[in-house]
Image: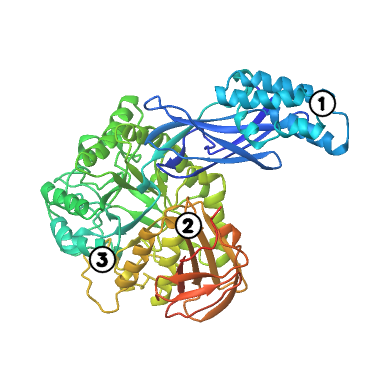
Amino acid sequence: MIGRIVIDEVRPRTPTGHPAKAVVGETVPVSADIFRDGHDILAARVRWRSTDKDGEWAEAPLHHVGNDRWEGTLEATALGHHELVIEAWTDAYATWRHKVTTKLGAGQDLGSELAEGAALLAARARKLDKEDREQLAAARGALLDESMSNWDRLRDALDVSIGQQLAGPASTKETTRTKPYPLWVDRERALYGAWYELFPRSEGGLRATAHNRLPAVADMGFDVLYLPPIHPIGTTKRKGRNNTLTPEPDDPGSPWAIGSPEGGHTSIHPELGTEEDFAELVRAAQSREMEIALDYALQCSPDHPWVSEHPEWFHHRADGSIAYAENPPKRYEDIYPINFWPSKDSDRVALWEACRDIFLHWIDRGVRIFRVDNPHTKPLAFWEWVIPQVRDRYPDTIFLAEAFTRPKVMAALAAVGFTQSYTYFTWRTSKWELEQYLIELTQGPVADYMRPNFWPNTPDILSGPLRGGGEAAFKIRLMLAATLAPAYGMYSGYELLENQPASETNEEYHQSEKYEIKKRDWDSPDSLAPWITTLNRFRRDHPALHRLRNIRFIACNNDAVMAFAKVSDDGADTVIGVVNLDPHTSHEATLYLDLPALGLAPDRPFEVEDAFSGRSFTWGPNPYVRLDPSEPAHLLHVVSPSVDAP
């Protein structure tokens, strides 16, 4: 029901009524359309609280920014469920102040306005402490003193401190309040982190990964080590090397063909090790301030125990046989999709609970991050149910949706609870594509609930300039992923410039690690590991890169050069990135900086330092840059800002 004051188009929110998202300590934009009839001046604020512990309300003002749009920020300090409300009221003091100063400037009679002001101060003084009441009493007395000029009578009442004392509504009766909007607050890793994906079988197993590969990954500055499925692999219709349908006896099969007589989703492949080996990997990661992320793939090989124990959990053909996965002309005979809506409700309940218990099993073993395989091929209703089932018990759990699917489906998965989302970054390569996509992700409605995780490559995807590309292409794409988004990841082999696609039309890798064990020379002198280490160290050292919605694109006169800036929440850290998007040719450009927006004086030079070269530059509003394929990017931070950032 619309009240005297209309509050509409509130953000942050989701279109489905599910919680919007924030992280602890993040400055979250809040906005709404707020208006009423007439010309009285309004005031508004956002209030929020934790609902898990019936927390105290916090509040922050909203400010009118034009066209009846009001904006502000909130900052949550606790993990879990929250709610926010927008409140608006007619600001009686500001309305009176505007009216009386307008009439004063026009030389009109102020008799009525002076009396109104005195009555307003008297009514509000009763709710103030003694010192403030005395100040208001003095101002009220001046308003009623007819022996003084109008200006002298108004001077004290118009003082800014009076407005501060009278801020807020006079009573709840004067306040219009929205319904509560839900907000889920995650830990920081939900927004910021560097992921590294590897197949432990290529490193000799779980324990060998812990001791031989994890240290190098940690030294490169990664926060999350993500493992594809580590479960037993089926042998029926097993795929061979390069996805062939005729495997050799020693071909290991795809880890996503989950399940054998040795176990299913809660078991570890015997060739990878034991539960104690997995525990050793978790401990090794924790000792280096890293986390282990596991793949959560709800599908089964024909040999999975569920197939014989619960055939009702699968799709069946007309002849009664269980249907394998198909995407014509492709056939995945080594995988049985799960039927999440069997005919009996009791079967559905049992299946969903079994799927939930997979999460709980690995959480009990120290895992708090899951990369979810193809969530768009399962019902939204299942995710809407299972994510809260897990998160309400373990609110620090993070769910990454691997959903390279249609935009609305991707957004819907984020709305129902996925913490992060794979995106279309891999296929965005030109300057205009990247800028428009980042604007959508950081300013559009999805920014309230969909957090991107940028990956330049995955075991399934070798795309864009990486296909046959050299060192410059790999640096460009990783620089963009790691600086445009606070969460990014890369699949192992990236540092060794692995770049051979399966074919001119197939985005997968030739000799894909999904179907074979790979041995790599991690000590290769051509490895990008030192460069990646510099990039990740810079990310850790600069809080401006820990946020998503603070990106500003910088205009320049060359479409092959992309420039952007990020400023930290407190304004103390300013980062500027400049990237040559052409891996084959040198490019130069003049940048056009909005210095006040970056907290810099428009009329004074400032110093920036490049993370990659170590060189310092003195810049003004229009610096010149030249970037070669040998070093295609500047990653700069402002060493000596000239004014406080806004």
Which label number is shown at residue 147? 1
Q: Secondary structure at mark 3?
A: helix
Q: Is residue 641 left or right of residue 62?
A: left
Instruction: State the image coordinates of residue 72 (x, y, percent, origin top left).
Output: 57, 41
Find disc 3 in the rendering and name its residue.
Answer: 241
Give the mark nearest the N terminus, 2 or 1.
1
Q: Is residue 461 visible?
A: yes
- Residues under labels 3 and 1: Cα distance? 99 Å
Which residue is rendered at x = 61% and y = 19% of the image?
A: 171
- Viewer-proximal residue among 499 and 523: 523
Which label number is shown at residue 424? 2
Q: Quadrant of residue 616?
A: bottom left
- Tally of marks: 3
Q: Secondary structure at mark 2?
A: loop
Give the mark nearest the N terminus, 3 or 1.
1
Residue type of the residue flagged with mark 3: Arg
Which residue is rendered at x = 56% and y = 49% of the image?
A: 443
Q: Quadrant of residue 55?
A: top left
Residue type of the residue flagged with mark 1: Ser
Q: Is residue 215 left or right of residue 352?
A: left
- Viewer-proximal residue among 221 and 602: 602
